[in-house]
Image: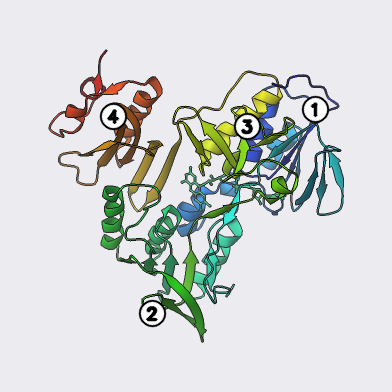
Amino acid sequence: MSGMQSEDQRCVIIGGSHAGVSAAFALRKYGWKGEIHIYEKTTYLPYQRPPLSKTFFYEEQHVDLLKLKSADNYVEQNIQLFLHTAITAIDRDSACVTTDRGNSVAYDYLIYACGARALVPSINGINHPSAIFCVRDLNDILRIKEKLKTYRTSPQALIIGGGYIGLEIASSLRKMDVNVVLLERENRLLKRVTVKEVSSYFDQLHSKNKVRVIKQKNVTHIEKAGKELNVFCEDGMTFTTDIIIVGVGIQRNTSLAKDAGLTIKKGIVVNQYCQTNDPSIYAIGDCAMHDNKKYKLQLSLESIQNANDQAKVAAATICGHEMAYDPIPWFWSDQYDTKLQTVGISTGYTDKIVRQEIGQSNSLSIWYFRDEKLLAVDAINHPKAYVLATRIIKKDQLVNKENCANPEIEFSPLHMIVSV
Ligand SMILES: Cc1cc2nc3c(=O)[nH]c(=O)nc-3n(C[C@H](O)[C@H](O)[C@H](O)COP(=O)(O)OP(=O)(O)OC[C@H]3O[C@@H](n4cnc5c(N)ncnc54)[C@H](O)[C@@H]3O)c2cc1C
């Protein structure tokens, strides 16, 4: 652990988003007296990403509503925020970073919070910036919204990818009365992250909302045809559309770390204190990969929980406090009037219980077990299931599986937990 610190020291944070900003404020909270610099390559005051595919997408909201902290907050906490400034290199021997303006900035501690960018699939003709969009940054969303405003009648949108981002965008587009076709390469939606019951729930939800969901469609090339775009699939099927939105996953921004000789696997490898193989460099958020003790898995998570909690651990450690990262991951997604909440990691489950509450056809929970141990729960419109599962997993309690599987039995801690 670190701990010795003075006003002369400097902590440099690369990346001003959920992880980097949380880390800066947590440093002050845990007593960091020295300088804090955040370098962020984009121009906006750091903002929240989750609303980008949800409320911010379909409502007329001012960008100010998205900001993580006000400009005054940074000043009050004496945090120096350098916007529109990218870090281009890390020199570990001299403990300094280089900015794209050619400045060299020394650090005592470095927090690497560069996150991820949208993965652009290798599809021929995908480069039509005026009509093909990704969904990662505020600018992506502002461009899509601008484009949609140019149509006098409902435009046609085609989404490539049936993961959370693609589905949230489909839902938001429908709220704006845009016609939507969604193409998924796999044989079901959300295949990478969940089981077939959840996939089919969302498939039906989107179909009910008039999204044309088409699975097992691999897009091979795109051609511009006047103002429209023609989309060609491997099996010969074609679609014509006005705009294309791509949501097929992310690429972690690890190249600077790699060039600096830090250990990289799926993300930058960190220990329980979010420290890389260089003890003065920490990596947090989407770009990091940690060893999860509870689940005995190496995980690279893409969630607000992970970004905020890793930020706290890194900041606390730098300030000499004992805090380790050993999370129970959680995540949410909003589509139409449906909220999905997931707690835990279902990887390696041996059996599952699907519980459909009586009289609430839109309320479902999937309970994943490794033998008797509850690993994770997907709760759809079922906040009680999410809260209870979180408690059970945290406390390593046992679920009364028989009661859990029987919707005739009231959903309550008394009936769901085995008292020992
Ligand atoms: C549309 C959308 C919806 C989402 N919805 C949810 C949700 O509902 N629930 C949930 O839990 N999570 C959601 N997420 C995921 C969540 O937003 C991410 O997990 C989170 O943003 C990760 O934060 P981060 O700070 O690690 O990375 P990022 O948010 O990716 O930020 C990294 C920052 O680093 C900057 N940067 C990169 N390289 C450099 C450099 N060399 N120099 C300077 N700056 C650099 C980037 O510009 C960026 O601002 C969503 C993400 C998106 C895009």
Sequence-earlier tag: 2 or 3: 2
Q: Nearer the viewer, mark 2 or mark 1?
A: 2
Q: What residue is rendered at 86% in x and 27% in y?
A: 8
Sequence-earlier tag: 4 or 1: 1
Q: Nearer the viewer, mark 1 or mark 3?
A: 3
Sequence-earlier tag: 1 or 3: 1
- Mark 1 → mark 3, Cα distance in angstroms: 20 Å
Give amino acid for label 1: Gly
Which residue lies under the disc numbered 3? 274
The coloring applied to the image is rainbow
Label 1–label 3 contact, CB within 8 A: no
Which residue lies under the disc numbered 4? 371
Sequence-earlier tag: 3 or 4: 3
Q: Position of residue 123 (x, y in %)?
A: 52, 71
Mark 1 crowd level (few <14, some 14–19, many ≥20, 10 Å Cα): some
- Mark 4 → mark 2, Cα distance in angstroms: 46 Å
Give SS at disc 4: loop
Q: Position of residue 62 (x, y in %)?
A: 57, 54
Q: What residue is rendered at 52% in x and 65% in y?
A: 121
Label 3–label 4 contact, CB within 8 A: no
Q: Nearer the viewer, mark 4 or mark 2?
A: 4
Which residue lies under the disc numbered 1? 34
